[in-house]
Amino acid sequence: MEFAFTEEQEMIRDTTAAFLAEVSDSAAVRRAMGTEQGYEPELWNRICSEMYWQAVHVPEAYGGMGLGYVELVAMMEQMGRSLLCSPFFSTVCLAGNALRVAGSEAQQAHWLAQLCEGTLTATLAFNGGSSRWDAESITATWRHAGDGYVLDGDYRYVIDGHTADLLIVAARAEGTTGVEGVSLFLLPADTSGVSRQWLPTMDQARKQAAVQLKSVSLTTDALMGEPGQGWTPLSKVIDLAAIALAAEQVGGCQQLLDMTVAYTSERVQFNRTIASYQAVKHKAADMMLKVEVARSAIYYAACVAQEALEGGPLSAELSEAASVAKSYCSDAYFAVAGDALQLFGGVGFTWEYDVHLYLKRAKSSEHLLGNGVFHRERLARMLLDEGEES
Amino acid sequence: MKLSFSPEDEQFRQEIASWLQLNLTGEFEKLRFRGGPGDEHTFPEERKVWEQKLAEGGWTCVGWSQEYGGRGCSIEQQVIFFEEYARAGAPGRVGHIGEGLAGPTIIAFGTAEQKKKYLPGIVAGTELWCQGYSEPSAGSDLANVKTKARFDEKHNKWMINGQKVWTSLAHESDYCFVIARTDLDSVAHKGLGFFLIKMDQPGIEVRPIEQITGTSEFNEVFFDEAQCDADDIVGAPGEGWKVAMGLLGFERGVSTLGQQMQFQNELDDVIRVAKSNGAAQDPAIRQRIAQAHAELKIMRYNSMRILSGQSGSDGGLQKEALIYKLFWSTWHRCLGELAMDVLGPECEILEDGPYALSRLQSLFLFVRSDTIYGGTNQIQRNIISERGLGMPKEPKGVAK
């Protein structure tokens, strides 16, 4: 047992932070978030060619760096801190994990290689428009047709869905409910019958899209795993992505706390810095508590995620770890953002100051992949409803 | 960063688990899950015998080096020891103040003679300790100690006069470590001494404090010309604050993991009640139970971070350590409230008559002290914002 970053992990974190400080300052974030694409392709190319982040936890056999989930989480924390506008979360944490968990040898070799080369962006679509990010949220359908499959249906809240080159989609066999009949498919975005619309969002720094499938024909090699057996791997992918997202939330929390301490230490009222007032100090202390507890949560969850990918003894704890981390970090992020805005006072309410960017990200990431209430109910089922599947 | 334990450590887990299974039986069976914080008043005599039983098995002071009679366990093994101890429901340790506070302080700051005189009794579980810090006018402002230590040259002894308060287990203890003013003209943290004082002497009177639970585990301790040998001051006169503060560091050690296992046992109790009385179907209760579970889980890994020494490279207390007291005390207080809300109107009824509290009723009331003792939540927030975030210090009032 060793619950601290190794020197190498610290180096990865620090390198990530240094690079982001250079390329993802407030001006860069505001430039990118104002576009429909939502990121600057030059920066993404630099990330892929110079930093190789997209390949962080892809095995070396498929052209990746072969690092673990702890490294991925350390990087996501830094990206959350700087609100990096990029297709990293969709490509690596959603689609990359889906390929690793559900892809066949051939599918991984084909798609992960392109992902690692930086020539492919990708995302995952499964939710038809529900606040519950479980199997019931899958409403699109698939059916056999000749040698292949035909897919129909709608998806919402698809991260970078309007720009991704590859969509990994979940659909259910017609007439099935719950976890039954779910399959995962690899769907190049230019396939006939796929239409995509950008959904403008309050949090402009992360883009969402609606995806519509109308009689989309796919060949057999598009299916990931066995037909109808897709929920188990998909649920694992969602858990892994939720852990990465929670790490991003922790980074945002830390940035808000640092900004707040800096601002209140400069702002003078009644001839004193407002940081000298106990009302301000105590709120800041509560913020720091949430940040540190949230950080402990994601380091724990990252270790479990790593074991889940390797088949270690803690694999079985993945859902629990994901719900522990996502519920705590979601609530912590929004609470910290709300406190930060309050302590900034009037300027916190302006478009010019960055606090609102984090407040909006806190709310959008809270609801993405299930909010605190959703994840606590998932935990409650594990704790209180014996013999029932979570 | 890795969570799994090595095969050798898992072997160690087997060892302590089987020892407990074999020995926590017979006369000790009734001690299971008893005697923790809030329950210190139960079975004191039996728990003293248990302390010695533990010592026979070599299970006291497991983290101390073998030089001082400890077991020399690694951090991992200490984690495992505390986990298995609490998992088995082994009773609250009457020796924990000696093992966790007095002993480590003597090891760090004491003389060779003091080590020889005091450590063996702690290791053997035969000599119990209490802590004499707080006073009626030295609560949050701990440095405002008024108890005086006057050196009597003729008898070569320190003479102690004053009053301590909130002294847990004083009525069961053989010794008390006390901070008292050696320089009578000094103020605040200057001019204090750190004394090791025998409790059984005419100059000391212990009066139990009746708490809101109706029970007493805290006491007032009165010193009226109490004596302390010249050799029983730790550090020099005037260095008492330094020694006392060094000791605070020991309070954040692995024993927090044992405390968390006790929390887990309490939460398991709450869950058991919720399942049996239908509260587990209430969506609001489900949310609160899940939240308690999630935060307790995180608490464990927060402690692992503290133990693994992440950050803190600036020599200061790590951030995850700074927030720990505020986190666990607030969590525990919420658990007490949750326990009552799970019980519903039944939470009011004293099944065994006045004023015999059930375990959960006792929990609900006792946890109100958690956010007060050892630095109130308000003091914790001052410490966090000043030391953790570098915000300005609270201005001090002017002494009248």
Image (cartoon, helix red, strand yellow):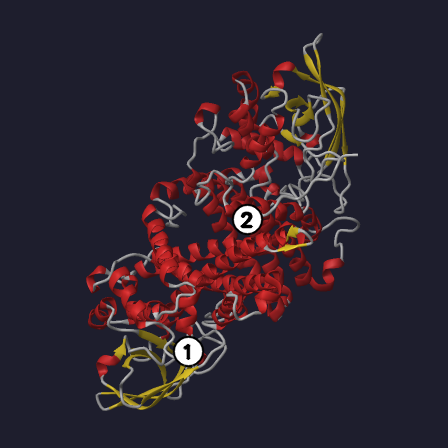
Q: Do the residues under discs 1 and 2 have CB atoms within 8 angstroms?
A: no
Q: Position of residue B397 (x, y in %)?
A: 73, 39
Residue type pointed to by label 1:
Gln
- Report in which chain the residue with disc 2 lies: B
Q: Which mark is residue B135?
A: none
Please rate how many residues cluster around mark 2, counting C-alpha atoms within 10 Å: few if below 14, some from 14 to 19, many from 20. some
Answer left or right for B241 relative to A70.
right
Q: Is residue B300 above or below residue A318?
A: above
**Between A336 and B99, which is closer to the camera in this rendering?**
A336
Q: Would residue B367 be seen by someone viewing this image from the given angle?
A: yes
In the figure, is residue B177 to the left or right of A263? Answer: right
In this rendering, position of residue A31 left or right of residue A334:
left
- Looking at the rendered structure, which numbered label has been put on residue A208? 1
Res B88 visible: no
In the image shown, does B182 or A176 lie closer to the viewer? Answer: B182
**What chain letter is assigned to the residue under label 1?**
A
Say which of B58 and B130 sits in front.
B130
SS at badge 2: loop
Residue B389's label in the rendered image is: 2
Amino acid bearing label 2: Leu
Q: Name the residue located 47 percent from the left edge and 53 percent from the top edge.
A: A296
Inter-mark Cα distance, 1 to 2 = 36 Å
Q: Position of residue A303 (x, y in %)?
A: 38, 55
